[in-house]
Amino acid sequence: MQPYRLHPAALPQMTLKEGSRRLLGFSSDVPLWRDERFLRAAAQSISAVLMIGAVVWLVTNFLQAAEQRGMSLSYDFLSQETGFPIGESVITYDPSRPFIYAFLVGLLNTLKVSLIGIIFATILGTIIGLARMSSNWLLSKLALAYIEFFRNIPLLVLLFIWYFAVFNRFPRVRDSFALPGPIYLNQRGLFVPWPKFTTEGLFFLGAILLGILAAIAAWIILRRLRERTGRRTYFGAVSLFLLLLFPALAWLGQGGQSITWDLPRLEGFNFQGGTGLSPEFAALLVGLVTYTAAFIAEVVRSGVQAVDRGQREAARAIGLSGTQVLSLVIIPQAMRVIIPPLISQFLNLTKNSSLALAIGYPDLFSVGRIMINQAGRAVPVFSMIMLTYLAISLFTSFILNLYNRRIQYEV
Amino acid sequence: MGVTTIEKRLAPPRRPGAIAWLRKNLFNSWLNSILTVVTVVVLIFILRAVLEWVFVNADWRPITRSPLLYLVGQYPRGELWRIAVSLWMVSFLFGLGWGVWRGLFRAFALALAAVLSAGVFLPPPVDAPALLFRLSWLINPLLVFLGFFLASWLHLKGRHVLIGWLISFIVTPILLRGVEGSSWLPSVETTLWGGLLVTLILAVGGLLLAFPIGILLALGRRSSLSVVHYSSVIVIEAVRGVPLITILFMTSIIVALFLPPELRIDRLVRAMAGMTIFAAAYIAENVRGGLQAIESGQIEAAKAIGLNNIQTIVLIELPQALRAVIPSLVGQFISLFKDTTLAVIVGITELLAIGRAVIQSDSEFIQLQAEVFVFIAVVFFVLSSVMSYSSRKLEERLGVGER
């Protein structure tokens, strides 16, 4: 705002009131209570005072109540021993670890089920979404039935069905279902072979990584070369070749002994070796995936259908092949529509994983509840849970929004 | 030698026969033919397994023994008339709404009539007169039609119906809860309420309370006053960033720790507060979308004819924004309806909790968990499908989503 310039000649005629108004930037012919700038400033300060007042009032009440009931609000218990076991953990855990460590176990369990769930839900959801758009009437209706069914039942009921009616009904350990692999399925969960962590395996893993890096580099360089010169560079085929070359060389070099598998086998009352999925984890994962896939299918379908039909027709008209139409015209445009709602489905899945509490998978929220009971610090633990979920949500949407912004403007 | 010329005409388009339809939709390429065959095989396999389970292997005793439990929980059987009267009130109001808003509301009214008529097939409670019980359900569709004709005949306006709804929202809780020390309306503790009754109360109550709060938050988020803007943003994003279960846990358990002992808030009310806060944040974002969709010309025109800020919001912006978000509000209601199941975790006896209680009530039922949870899933599926179908009809009428 430009400072109000006072002409010296104007000064003597002004009253003090008028002068101060002019100095504050209010024009003199509008009464103060109708001046929008004044009203805005007043509303701003009143709302600020009310808001601060409300917060102060709540906090003092809260502190008072906490003191009266002898509730401790400090976080010092976090370094104490927990004394409770946790069903499963990504990192090694035992009851002598401190509380903060147990919290970390819960967080990692939440992240584990969310991450794996997001990957599978995206795959399943895309397949169902594509099936929904299929020209095959039966397949399309089947996909519709799937979507309608899973969208219209509560997730918690679905989890109960998966856990209590499916995974808990599997045979006892001794009568496990044996699938080829060998994979065993029983009350204690799902047992699958798992690669042993050896130096040969590490070398092989390095070769795979090298292959991926080489493939990406070749793709970028050759593609750019084609864009600049217009020559065919076979970037797809070259990348694929490089991708397979390094692991294949390593495999041959090691005489086909790159990976040694740790096979699950029955020892005593339970399976040893391999890796196992607990029934809780399996039920939660399957429940989250089957539920979220229905929503992702709708996201995918609406995204692809949002691309104007003229685009496909024009692409065919200039002679692009079927796969080219899809990869160069349809998918890049559909992605712009798909990404934002997809982000919110990923976040929904992560937040929904807190229902793990109901079937006993030790995720962030259920470990947090045990901590509340064990340490008797409801407020500190609860604030940690809330802030952690909030941080996961904000961080995920921040990262994915960056990606989203890139594809929205670059193409 | 005369030549007769026959006028050349195109053959009339043949109606595609069944074979043609099959060929076009199921066998139009070899890939599709394989897909069709695979799908049919899978479908037959699934259908056989499902039918065999439903009609042969499943044991439906946990449901058939006391279906009323799933509807109203432990609500005293002698006081069931109160729930019947509340339902009549709702039916009548839906009928009035149909009469006033016609096609916009018809699908909802007819769906309600159909769903409530189905209550006839429920077995009546042991000590109640069976005929009266069955008739009490059949009154509902009659009231829907009565409301429709009454509204048409009296040329009622939307505001009359809204006043009717407002009255019912005040009367219903009093009717269900009762009055302390009254002889003809004895109080019924909410701990006795249960089943679908509680599920619906949580969803309807949560949405109704959340609606005004959501509008305020949306307006706050659009406010140019930075204090109001930022506090609205913080509330909305914080609530949307955490799972519903943590909010329910906060309002049901954490808040209770800090209330003075003499101030005991009802458990149901605390759970409903959680649902409300949660729904309000999502409604706020819906409403904000509606507000953003309003052409700026509308607001400029309002300013030009001399309306002030508040008048512009109340008379110009909100009516248009709210009309645009009605279908998404129905969607919000459906997801809130499904989310009420989470209240089981904070000890509310809604439908799912009743299911678990039934399972634990009899040692034979421990093996019958699948039956109970599948039944509950079907109840939710039928009710949400009916609602989303009605909402699609509404969308078609409103022309939302069509260009």
Image (spheres, rainbow, N blue to C red):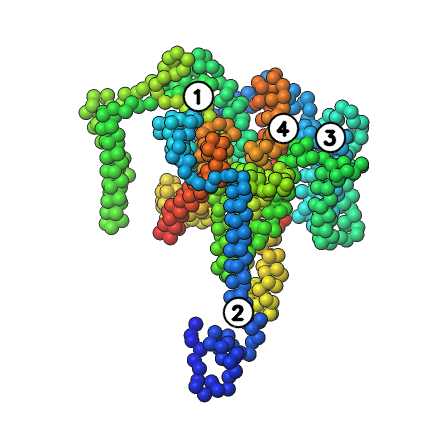
Mark 1, chain letter? A
At mark 3, the secondary structure is: loop
Please say if the residues under marks 4 and 2 sit with CB atoms less than 8 Å apart: no
Pointer 2 local density, CA inside 10 Å: few below 14, some 14–19, many at least 20:
some
Task: Check disc 3 and report the residue beneath it.
Answer: B76
Instruction: Give the left or right position of residue B304, taking residue A91 as reference.
Output: right
Instruction: Give the left or right position of residue A332, taking residue B49 as reference.
Output: left
The residue that appears at 72% across and 51% down in the rendered structure is B163
Give how far apart the Cα atoms at labels 3 and 1 are: 43 Å
Q: Is residue B94 above or below residue B159?
A: above
Task: Check disc 4 and report the residue beneath it.
Answer: B354
Q: Is residue A40 above or below residue B330?
A: below
Mark 4, chain letter? B
Residue type at the position of mark 2: Phe
Task: Check disc 1 and report the residue beneath it.
Answer: A189
The residue that appears at 27% across and 36% down in the rendered structure is A212
Give how far apart the Cα atoms at labels 1 and 4 are: 28 Å
Q: Quadrant of residue B315?
A: bottom right
The residue that appears at 51% across and 80% down in the rendered structure is A16
Residue B217 percent location from the top left of the image: 55, 53
Residue type at the position of mark 4: Ile
At mark 2, the secondary structure is: helix
Give how far apart the Cα atoms at labels 4 and 3 are: 15 Å
N-terminal label among 1 and 2: 2
At mark 4, the secondary structure is: helix
Pointer 4 local density, CA inside 10 Å: few below 14, some 14–19, many at least 20:
many
Give how far apart the Cα atoms at labels 1 and 2 are: 68 Å
The residue that appears at 44% across and 14% down in the rendered structure is A173
